[in-house]
């Protein structure tokens, strides 16, 4: 059996694996797609000390760093079940195999909920964006829309209003759902237009980048087109934790509840990165949390093997 088994091979999982391996303990990583969300990213400009890199290049660097150590990397493996058996845990994989380990670090990440409208996929990273902290500066002086009037959408619109020339916030419902204080702030900004009861129906582009957004008024049924350069989709970040329901404690949003050591509700099972309740889903944060969960797992191993 492994001493530390990491499930998920994004930044959090890679950091956890490196930290565990450096303790000289038997470490494995099972990942559906080693690299994680970073593989879908173009420019990364907020990984401190590296002013600019590209997602796939960063993912390769993560893997190379892990491979410097004796880590058993099992790529293209999907975990389907976590169970406890006395002093160890078992992870059942979709392939039918079962992995045993004394501790587990869950780092299965998350995925952005998509609008599912024509043009969204085609123009992803070509004007369609999901992370204002990451891609906001690319739209300096340009016109953008934010889809979604919950807290994250309204926060994104406030953030982008300080960078972009103009922001249109589009909400499907008749009113915004964000906290009052955020709504008041948003409404005080001169370069923001708020549209409610508006259903986004299409992302338009010139073949290489976004140049417009089409929406339908849910009141009048009229179709409108807005000319713009960027669209930030803020309709939810879904943690990849469906398979853990009923096994460990999850928040109402499905995030794994962790304490400040990355410990979950099941002693010996830790979690890190975008799949957890830790706020602000970013690479630097996922890396730090992965390292922390790994050190906490090591601590747990020392204590549980004491005579
Ligand atoms: P992830 O990167 O999501 O990795 C999860 C891992 O778990 C993957 O290997 C996945 O295959 C695996 N997995 C999932 N389910 C299972 C399962 N059941 N069994 C086994 N393995 C599983 N952040 C920044 O800091 N800067 C940026 O510029 C930036 N740009 C971004 C652009 C885009 C388009 C996106 C989508 C995200 C961006 N982010 C950026 C956010 C950043 O990518 C994430 O915060 C970070 O990748 C989270 O790392 P993670 O390890 O927690 O999860």
Image (cartoon, rainbow, N blue to C red):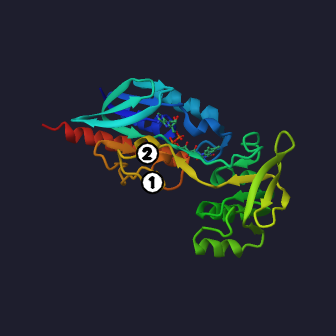
Q: Which residue is mark 1?
A: 277
Is the C terminus in the top left, top right, bottom left or bottom right quadrant? top left
The image shows residue 165 at horizontal and vertical percentages of: 80, 62
In front of the other: 228 or 197: 197
Is the N terminus in the top left, top right, bottom left or bottom right quadrant? top left
Residue at (25%, 38%) from the top-left corner?
Answer: 301
Q: Mark 2: which secondary structure?
A: loop
The image shows residue 60 at horizontal and vertical percentages of: 58, 29
Judge from the rendering whether residue 253 lies leftward or rightward of residue 82; answer left or right. Answer: right
In front of the other: 218 or 246: 218
Judge from the rendering whether residue 127 lies leftward or rightward of residue 93; answer left or right. Answer: right
Q: Earlier in the sequence, mark 1 or mark 2?
A: 2
Q: Mark 1: which secondary structure?
A: loop
Dot label at residue 272: 2
Is the CB of the residue bearing disc 2 within 8 angstroms of ligand 1?
A: yes
- Where 91 sits versus 70, above or below? below
Q: Nearer the viewer, mark 1 or mark 2?
A: 1
Q: Is residue 55 visible?
A: yes
In front of the other: 10 or 80: 80
Label 1 environment density (alpha carbons within 10 Å; few <14, some 14–19, many ≥20): many
In front of the other: 223 or 49: 223
Ligand 1 image position (quadrant): top right
Judge from the rendering whether residue 149 lies leftward or rightward of residue 107; answer left or right. Answer: right
């Amino acid at each position: 059996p492994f001493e530390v088994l990491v499930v998920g091979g994004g930044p959090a999982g890679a950091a956890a694996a490196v930290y565990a391996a450096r303790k000289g303990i038997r470490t494995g990583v099972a990942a559906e797609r080693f690299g994680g969300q970073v593989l879908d990213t173009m420019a990364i400009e907020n990984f401190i000390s590296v002013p600019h890199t590209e997602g796939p290049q960063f993912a390769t660097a993560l893997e190379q760093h892990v491979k410097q150590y004796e880590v058993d990397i099992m790529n293209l493996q999907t975990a389907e079940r976590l169970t406890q058996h006395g002093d160890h845990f078992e992870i059942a994989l979709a392939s039918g195999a079962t992995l045993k380990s004394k501790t587990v670090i869950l780092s299965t990440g998350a995925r952005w909920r998509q609008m599912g409208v024509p043009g969204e996929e085609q123009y992803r990273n070509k004007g369609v964006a999901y992370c204002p902290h990451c891609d906001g500066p690319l739209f300096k002086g340009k016109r953008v829309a934010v889809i979604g009037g919950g807290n994250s959408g309204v926060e994104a619109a406030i953030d982008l209003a300080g960078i972009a020339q103009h922001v249109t916030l589009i909400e499907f419902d008749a009113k915004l759902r964000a906290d009052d204080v955020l709504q008041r702030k948003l409404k005080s900004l001169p370069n923001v237009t708020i549209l409610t009861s508006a259903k986004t129906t299409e992302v338009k582009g010139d073949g290489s980048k976004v140049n417009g957004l089409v929406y339908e008024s849910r009141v009048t049924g009229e179709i409108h087109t807005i000319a713009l350069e960027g669209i930030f989709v803020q309709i939810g970040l879904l943690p990849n934790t469906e398979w853990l329901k009923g096994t460990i404690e999850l928040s109402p949003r499905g995030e794994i509840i962790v304490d400040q050591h990355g410990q979950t509700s099941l002693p010996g099972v830790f979690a890190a990165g975008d799949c957890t309740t830790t706020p602000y889903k970013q690479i630097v944060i996922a890396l730090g949390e992965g390292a922390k969960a790994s050190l906490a797992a090591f601590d747990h191993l020392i204590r549980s093997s004491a005579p």
